[in-house]
Amino acid sequence: QVQLVESGGGLVRAGGSLRLSCTASGTISSINAISWYRQAPGKQRELVAVISSGGGTNYADSVKGRFTISRDNAKNTVYLQMNSLKPEDTATYYCNGDLTVNDGGIYYRRRYDYWGQGTQVTVSS
């Protein structure tokens, strides 16, 4: 069974920082990419940042220069360092894994099947 577990959310004042973590476990053959999404009440889920297996990164325009995504391959963990937080960053943050999984000796690539449970980030003004 494959799991993605997030941690690190919380309440912070505008201008503050938080670091989110997403740890993957289970019958994973390879992690092709990990993405962070967020969803605010009444809004659609949006892509925040993504990091590929090679370390390439991409960010939403709204977070460029403030957020940094990184990975620790030895720990199967991806981090999202969020600095200069704004009230509009308030949302539930989810990580998504583009994974190749081993299912009884058969390997499957799954891009959108695996999500974390979500972690709440609240930024007060």
Image (tube, helix red, strand yellow):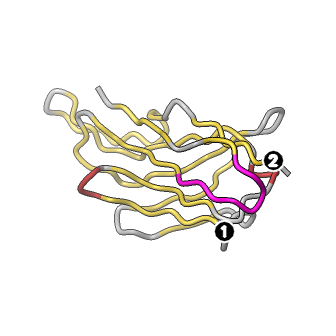
Amino acid on which disc 2 is placed: Ser
Q: Residue at x 64, y 51 (%)?
A: 47
Q: Is 116 situated above or below 109?
A: above
Which residue is denoted by mark 2 in the rendering? 124
2 vs 1, front mark: 2
Q: Residue at x 49, y 40 (%)?
A: 7
Specify start and end residues of the magenta stretch as a single range: 12-19
Q: Quadrant of the N terminus?
A: top left
Q: Which image quadrant for residue 62?
A: bottom right
Mark 2 to mark 1 CA distance (whole Å): 17 Å
> Which mark, by number, is residue 66?
1
User: Residue farthest to the left?
Assistant: 105
Q: Residue at x 59, y 54 (%)?
A: 18
Q: Secondary structure at mark 1?
A: loop
Q: Which image quadrant for residue 43?
A: top right
Q: Position of residue 87 (x, y in %)?
A: 81, 51
